[in-house]
Amino acid sequence: MRGPAGLPLPLVVAVTLAAAAVMVVEARFVVEKNSLMVTSPTSLRGRHDSAIGNFGVPQYGGSMAGTVVYPKDNADACEAYDGDRHFRAKPGALPNFLLIDRGNCLFAKKVWNAQNAGASAVLVVDDKDEPLITMDLPREDDEAAKYIQNITIPSALIDKKFGEQLKKAIKDGEMVNVNLDWREAVPHPDDRVEYELWTNSNDECGPKCDMLMNFLKEFKGAAQLLEKGGYSQFTPHYITWYCPQAFVVSKQCKSQCINHGRYCAPDPEQDFSTGYEGKDVVVENLRQLCVFQVAKESKKPWIWWDYVTDFHIRCPMKDKKYNKKCAETVIKSLGLDVKKVDKCMGNPNADSDHPLLKMEQDAQIGKGSRGDVTILPTLVVNNRQYRGKLERKAVLKAICAGFEETTEPNVCLSDEMETNECLNDNGGCWQDKAANVTACRDTFRGRVCECPTFNGVQFKGDGYSNCEPAGPGKCLINHGGCWHETRNGKTFSACQESGNGKCQCPAGFRGDGVKKCEDINECKEKKACQCPECSCRDTWGDYECTCSGDLLYIKEHDTCISKTAVQGKAAWAAVWGILIVLVVVAAGSYVVYKYRLRVS
């Protein structure tokens, strides 16, 4: 099938979807800026705007002074600099800010090379006379993935005219000192911060998805502490696109959209014929929105962080578990009502607007000082888009900069945090109440579900629904999960310390060893006490065998022998014992005698 101008329909749909997204958001994109103050030379003194890079770590709430350095060679920083920490400042001197030219390679690569050369910050000079733009990470780039997570210095883009003035001053031998100021980059009106995260449930979209998933896990503990303490109000958001009316019935729109083309997401593999479809992502995004709504109604909105991190761990696309069944398992483990979540989600095949998703599309359009959301992921703090690395400490610093001075909570002042999530429903993790063992562990990142080591015994399992003792000592912990029973002070257990580690019924019992072991009637089944003079009586887990007359029963041989024979054997054993002792004493005496003769 062909579309307008003879283009293949799949291409038309893809381009139109992208164009639709651009029409919605691109026109009102706001470049977040920080102030750059030149303190010397006098001829350039004054304030200038600089656009905060969307990677690295801007110093939100603070400022940084430094000396501007322009490299004589490799001015675009697209190659690694020679020497060890070439631009590292000498002790007692101001930090060096590396001034580099735009072009020829990725922004992130330039900053990475500058950081490795010892620069404390980077100023990139635009190569065009144009309004400032936000230096962003590539959408998906294998090369950039190697270093974007490790950029820890701030960076900013400055306009071409200002950059040329800085270069000339440096060339003329002037000392150029500047101050980068992020103190007003985030509004800080009161003692509560409102922030939102525009995210996505797709976990197979390359470096950005990996960065997002790592951030969710790392930041969860701090986010929940802020929310529980009433210090913040958090709201998750999800971007969706719409399918143009002309293509609603196409295969491509049907695979990427729900509600008859109203809400769409790109195909995760960019291949309509394999793997998951875009509509699978939209449905899971909607489920995560509904989890937040249901948790918020129960006055526990912070449970959203547990759900999204647990879903990523337990239901990844690569394991083919990205589905409703796995999602509902996670929802139940967190104590949320699955029926309420389903009711919130509604019918994805309905030819009508969905209230939540319609609100999400409206919210994509910027209001007031906040620009439209065009980058995923995007963090918005006090209605101002955050720029920089999506990393726990960097984001926490930006959020803390949003509090009115002196009202910051303790979480902003120290990394030592106790979330105490395990106190409520064991954090949704595995627990053996009988043995008082749990897989829930509080960390500064929030609770994690990991099978523990208890009394020297290591447990193994997924930490959520299953943990089993393994290795030496496992039978000391609830008999290793195997069958066991006590009667009249006697205990039998199917737990085996050695062997293959499986539960195995002990001698005298048969069964699966886990749930059941039944006593074997050795007498009835003629497994013991079979000699003619024997008399058998079955007991629990064992048997008793007696012999007629003055005969004695020998269990090892399952036979009866006379007491006289036993006594005779015992007497001969005593005689032989005495003889052996006499021989040893005599040999010892002889050795002592010979030794004395030699030394006399």
Image (cartoon, grey):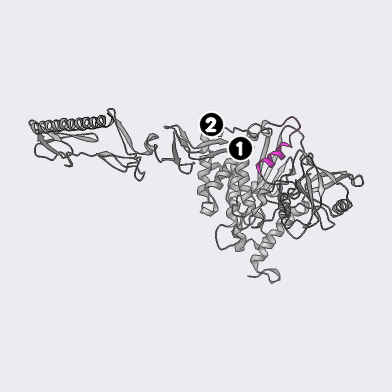
One can see residue 336 in this view: no
Label 2 to label 1: alpha-carbon separation: 14 Å
Q: Quadrant of residue 275?
A: bottom right
Q: Residue furthest bottom?
A: 6
Q: Which residue is drawn at 91% across and 44% down?
A: 42
Question: For residue 4: magenta?
Answer: no
Q: What is the total number of numbered labels drawn onto the structure image?
A: 2
Q: Is residue 147 above or below residue 544?
A: below
> Magenta span covers which residues?
391-409
Which residue: 89% across, 52% down? 172
- Type of the residue with mark 1: Gly
Is residue 283 in view?
yes
Mark sitting on residue 221 = 1
Q: Where is residue 70 in the image (x, y as percent from the top left)?
A: 81, 52
Q: What residue is pinned by disc 2?
A: 423
Question: Residue 274: x, y in percent?
Answer: 55, 61
Q: In this view, does 112 lie to the left or right of 589?
A: right
Q: Position of residue 26 (x, y in %)?
A: 75, 54
